[in-house]
Amino acid sequence: MRSSIFTTLILFLTLLSYAQDKLFVPEEITTNRKLYPSGLSNVQWMGNADRFTWQDSKSLIGGSTAGESPDTLLRIGDLNTHITGLGKSEIKRFPWIEWENETIFSFSTGNDWFEFNTTEKTLKQRFSLPENAVNAETGPGNKYIAYTIDNNLFINDGKTDITVTNDENKGIVNGQTVHRNEFGISKGTFWSPQGNLLAFYRMDETMVTEYPLVDVTERVAKANPIRYPMAGMTSHEVTVGIFNPSKQTTVFIETGRPADQYLTNIAWSPDEKSLFIAVLNRDQNHMKLNEYDVATGKFISTLFEEKSDRYVEPLHPMVFVPGSNGQFIWQSQRDGYNHLYLYHR
């Protein structure tokens, strides 16, 4: 008996000693997905309700602030039944959704946009865009969707495609990113808070020389030149337009000279009467946060300026305090640290 206990003890100590000698190498720590903490995908509130959702590849799951057990709101099989009922193809994974209110969420698959009512268990197709449409962005309330084809901008109201720009010269690009995606620029269209108006970038790069690139993804490689200003050469010129879908009219903001200055961090006032643009000089050391009249495009005032002996880099549009048309938050590194500042215009 004592011999068995002694043998077991020796075996345990041997294994323990081996386990202590087994060390992780850096690759196991940094790339071993088994060590990653599990997370929740696409967590968001259900409108103004005290419930929230997340999702995996096959279902949408709901949770509650009251501590109730999570429940499955919708499975991909049930969603596919609705999708195929509208004559569309099945999807492989549960789509990335966005809640419009407490009961309706929207999602897209391909160039089709849908709304699902979780109370009525109904699916409605909201928009269907041309096959070559890109840069799509829905407005608040899903009244309209903006998109681009080649170098021009369009919107759709659920029934009709509306032409916003019609520039035949490919050197004039509308509704897309400008300034080489610097200064936080990640898109070229900006819906107003109620979705009644659309601000957009218009980039004129006809004065910029073409730089040759080769598309090697094709079976036979082909030339695919881009316009790229080499150091010291002329750069593109950017303006901002505001399109009114109901009137189908466009007003361009009068941002002044020089024409090649940077127009960044576009934001709307909550009442949709003003547009704000962080105007940055070419030396990138002097920024003015300007307010413009949406109806006329005229300059109203400069809210404040930021200057530096080195550089100024505005990255985030102003964010208005909920319920206020005057108070807003501005994010800046003006003192060397990233801080939030509360302003009242």
Image (tube, rainbow, N blue to C red):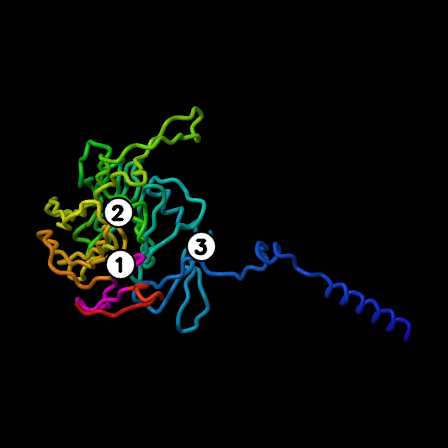
Give the residue at x 15% y 58%.
291
**Which residue is the site of mark 1?**
317
Residue marked by disc 3: 59
Residue 55 against residue 320 in the figure, above or below: above
Describe residue 81's horizontal placement relative to residue 275 as left or right. right
Q: CA distance from mark 3 to mark 2?
A: 33 Å
Residue type, mark 2 in image: Gly
Q: Can you tell which mark lies on residue 188? A: 2
The residue at the point 26 percent across, 36 percent down is 208
Q: Within the image, what quadrant is residue 193 found in?
A: bottom left
Does residue 312 show up magenta in the picture? yes
Secondary structure of the residue carrying numbered label 2: loop
Quarter of the N terminus within the rendering: bottom right
Frontmost residue, 123 versus 248: 248
Q: Amino acid at mark 1?
A: Pro
Residue 164 x, y percent position in the rendering: 17, 41
Residue range highlighted in magenta: 309-330
